[in-house]
Image (cartoon, rainbow, N blue to C red):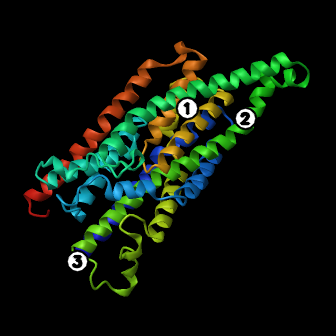
Amino acid sequence: MLTLVLVVILAALVFEFINGFHDTANSIATVVATKVLAPGWAVALAAAMNLIGALTGTAVAATIATGIINTNVVDASSQVILCALLGGIVWNLITWWKGLPSSSSHALIGGLCGAALAAAHNNWDALIWSETAGHWVKNKGLLWKVFVPMISSPIAGFVLGVLVMLLLWAIIAGMARAGGILRRMARPRWVNAFFGKAQIASAAYMGYAHGHNDAQKTMGIIALTLMGAQAGGVLDDLPGWLSFLHPDPAAGGTDVALWIVLTCAVVMALGTASGGWKIIKTLGHKMVKLHPINGFAAEVSSATILTVAASFGMPVSTTHSISTAIMGVGYAKNPKALKLSVIERIVWAWILTIPAAGAIAYGMLWALQQVGWA
């Protein structure tokens, strides 16, 4: 059983690596599309900022570890977690191969739900739907931590993208009316030059937000695995060199050990450094033509949503927020400039992600049950 726990941790790190290159495009597609940074430099920036972001919080990790699977109904065994991870990994690879910016977050959550349902023999109480702890901010479960943000974050991304774009144009128009040096700075050449530099900062902010939200999901998976192994006695009598696997008794069941945080942060950064060029092409070139000011508006909008969501422990999709922010910016620029056929493919990938990853995980655990391995 200890070997299986180690296999699950390895699978979780593989998922984190894939998340890195699968979602690299989310933080650098616009800065590449606007030709502000060459792809290699953009990936390096994203990797560095992913690493920093991953080290700055664990609220989302706590949601994944304690807010989705009802451990009073289903045992969060290593087999369950492994099938959940494989469901997310398979779906991520399928969408990456097709160049679709689907959500790694929702793939992981879908995998957890599918594996938990299979383990509980279709008892839907195996999932935590909604729990209230005295204040709406503390609500947890799939309803408040997954489904509400799944709907609200794309809407917020679109609206904020529109508003930031309109605000920037209003500022530029005001400068043009003011005359003098401000009027000269409002000319297209100066605007492009300024936002070409400003977009480096916004891309860094986006990379930080991606690491801050997405890296924590794998941290939560590893913490959940170790909690289940501890409860099952698998971690009893560990050899000294594996003693770090024991959950921290002072963590209260929700905090994440430092070694988990550091490992996930480094693995995501390495995955990011490997790039994800197919998705970059879809987000950065196929949806709408972008200029530096558009890329800046989209990145600031998306990164703000991710950072705020992470502070509430919500595993929000980086893909959803940046894609809809780009849509919002494109809509503000020219509603007819949006390429609806590309957007339709992306939306279908969003809709299918949770049930598809869940079905894959469910099928895998069911197969293990049939042969007596789960």
Q: Which residue is mark 3?
A: 233
Q: Which residue is mark 2?
A: 196
Q: Nearer the viewer, mark 1 or mark 2?
A: 2
Label 3's element? loop
Question: Looking at numbered disc 2 in the image, what kind of residue is underneath it?
Answer: Gly
- Which of pointers 3 and 1 indicates the residue nearer the eye? 3
Q: Residue at position x 37%, y 69% from top?
A: 252
Q: Residue at x 54, y 16 (%)?
A: 337
Secondary structure at numbered mark 1? helix
For residue 370, side relative to residue 14 (left or right): left
Measured as percent of width and height from the top left, residue 261 is found at 48, 64
Query: Circle 1 sits on which residue?
Result: 284
Measuring 8% from the left and 57% from the top, which residue is drawn there?
Answer: 370
Residue at the top extreme, as displayed: 336
Residue type at mark 1: give it: Gly
**Do labels 2 and 3 touch, CB within 8 Å?**
no
Q: Horizontal and vertical percent for residue 241?
A: 39, 84
- Whether residue 290 is visible to the viewer of this picture, yes or no, is no
- Nearer the observer: mark 2 or 3; the answer is 3
